[in-house]
Image: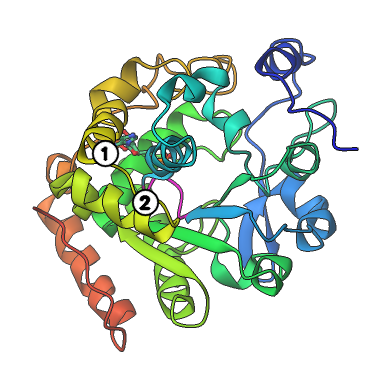
Amino acid sequence: MQKPDLTPKDYADILNNVPEGLFYRFPLCLVNGVPLMKHIAEQWEGVEKFQARPDDILIATYPKAGTTWMQEIVDSIMNNGELEKNKRAPTHVRSPFLEICSPPPVPSGVDILNNTPSPRLVKTHLPFKLVPESFWEHKCKTIYVARNAKDNAVSYYFFDRMNKTQPDPGTWDQYVERFLTGEIAWGSWFDHVIGWWNAKDKHDVLYMFYEDMKEDPKREIRKVMKFLGKNFSEEVLDKICQHTNFKAMKENPMANYSTVPNMLLDQNLSPFMRKGEVADWMNYFTESQNKMFNMEYEKRMKGTDLKFRTNI
Ligand code: A3P
């Protein structure tokens, strides 16, 4: 018999009571050439052999591309717009993070997912080549969200400062270089967005863009709704738009990661719901960083028809 959901209280209790020193800025180790946090690399076999179920919905992103936003949208759709149901638990319990591993007693993403009743909303930041094969054997529906590289880099920089389990990002100048070389957790943005772009033609993957979602949320939510085989009235769609807008999610304790202790995510340094905008990169890139970034970008994106907007 399937065990019940890990309750939000169970999870909060575990995180709030971990021994001092359990969490620190974990170093990165390569898994098939992709840098991942040490504990993920050490427990990789469990991730690789993960058993997907045919009705799993996979939400895949490069970190900071709009994962949490899409998780809230998909949960709202799966709850048929009965948004009270979204309040049952914080994002990371409603939609567990497949590959995440911390030292015991914190349960791994795989452990949590194995104890989650179907239909499961599975979050991953894995590049396509590292996704467990069982998702494709079962033809699982997958939603990928991509965000333009410059805004993605800025968002990730602030996140790496506040996430006390990821390597220190250093200065912004150093970070821009590391982002381009892919020496950060989950590796190269280029490999990620292109790998998934190519995968969408072979699997049941809906490829979404953060910029499109900002431009016209209702249009984009409708796309996701149709992909998931649902059909709602305009009124229900409007309700979901309202529930998943930046301001509403920033104020929603079940979506803004405020239930995760500060020693893990230090929201005094930078809020998880930081700005939620397109083109914030303009506030951080110097002229020379922008020039260098554009040159490398052109080289790396040559040969793909994948196009991004850095402004809307
Ligand atoms: P910023 O740091 O640019 O503000 P992820 O969920 O993948 O970690 O991505 C986090 C980024 O998405 C953050 O970007 C966050 O503010 C933004 N975000 C989260 N919810 C959003 C929403 N409802 N609308 C727009 N952006 C949102």
Tell me which amino acid carries mark 1.
Leu
Judging by the rendered image, the residue that carries numbered circle 2 is 225
**Is residue 146 something one can see in this rendering?**
no
In the displayed structure, does residue 260 sit left or right of residue 45? Answer: left
For the stretch drawn in magenta, what is the main secondary structure? Answer: loop
The mark total stands at 2
- Per the rendered image, the range of residues in magenta is 61-65
Q: Position of residue 120 (x, y in %)?
A: 64, 45
Where residue 107 sits: x, y (%)?
Answer: 79, 32
| Magenta span includes 63 | yes
Q: Is residue 18 visible?
A: yes
Quadrant containing ligand 1 reads top left
Do residues under tags 1 and 2 come within 8 Å of each other at their CB atoms? yes
- Amino acid at circle 2: Met
Q: Residue furthest bottom?
A: 303
Q: Is residue 10 left or right of residue 158?
A: right
Residue 31 versus residue 67 in the image, above or below: below
Question: In percent of the image, x 73 and y 58: which residue is there?
Answer: 52
Quarter holding the N terminus? Answer: top right
Query: Which numbered circle lies on residue 237?
Result: 1
Q: Secondary structure at mark 2?
A: helix
Name the image colouring. Answer: rainbow
Judge whether 164 appears above or below 253 on screen: below
Q: Residue at x 31, y 89 (%)?
A: 303
Residue 174 coordinates in the image, percent (x, y): 37, 49
Q: Residues within 10 Å of mark 2 (few under 14, many from 20)?
A: many
- In magenta segment, residue 43: no
Against 248, residue 141 (above or below) is below
Task: Bin the neighbour count of mark 1 within 10 Å (Cα to Cα): few under 14, some 14-19, many 20 and up.
Answer: many
Mark 1 within 8 Å of ligand 1, using the beta carbon:
no
Q: CA distance from mark 1 to mark 2?
A: 9 Å
